[in-house]
Image (cartoon, grey):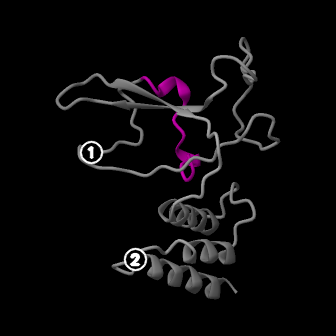
Amino acid sequence: MIGYENRILPKEDFNDDGKDAGELGAGHSVTALYEIVRTGSKTKLSDVDELKYQKTEPIKTGKFKDELMTVKLRYKPLYEDKSLLIPVEISAAKEIRTPSDNYKFSAAVVEFGMLLRDSEFKGNSSFENIIELAKSSLGEDESGYRAEFVRLVQTCQLMKN
């Protein structure tokens, strides 16, 4: 999950209701963006040690071939102490679609955050790329927040130079 690289919950703590993670209150919503690294990529993902007794091999064919990933969420019903698991399977895209303005604008905001904190995962991010992506996804900007974001990035770009 982009932006949470330094707050990764160890896998053995995911089912532990005593561990704090990314909590949300009732009625709140959140947008999470994930970078999906395809099988066979040379991208270095983490410094986690190799498994000693179990090998993780990518699945090439079989019953999971139409799945891109599974996202697992846990939640606690109101007034209860035990959390419940919600696994959500994301199917692999059959065709490439044009991303929505909301998606592209969110990507520009995430890229800006990664550039500001000099994330090791920022790739070839630049102020120019962010500005171009944000401008191309202004959409209906009734309150002017998206245009204000573009001005903020431009100001940071000037300060950097």
Residue at which label 2 appears: 141
Q: Would residue 85 be found to the left or right of residue 120 on screen?
A: left
In the image, residue 154 above or below residue 95: below
Type of residue at label 1? Gly
Whichever of callouts 2 and 1 sits on the residue coming sooner in the sequence is: 1
Determine if the magenta segment contains residue 39: no
Label number found at residue 58? none
Residue drawn 19% across the image and 32% down it: 78
Please identify the dominant SS of the magenta region: loop
Check if mark 2's residue and mark 1's residue have beta carbons within 8 Å: no
Q: Residue furthest left?
A: 79
Residue drawn 38% across the image and 51% down it: 30
Image location (x, y in percent) of residue 118? 66, 64
Residue nearer the viewer, 69 or 82 = 69
Q: Residue furthest front?
A: 95
Q: Residues within 10 Å of mark 1 (few under 14, many from 20)?
A: few
**Total numbered circles:** 2
Determine if the magenta segment contains residue 2: yes
In the image, residue 42 above or below residue 124: above
Task: Give the quarter of the figure containing the C terminus.
Answer: bottom right
In the image, residue 92 above or below residue 106: above
Label number found at residue 25? 1
Q: Would residue 34 be found to the left or right of residue 17 on screen?
A: right
Secondary structure state at the residue bearing disc 2? loop
Image location (x, y in percent) of residue 38? 73, 39
Q: How far is the residue under mark 2 from the one under mark 1? A: 28 Å
In the image, residue 47 above or below residue 4: above
| Magenta range | 1-15
Residue drawn 66% across the image and 59% down it: 119
Type of residue at label 2? Asp
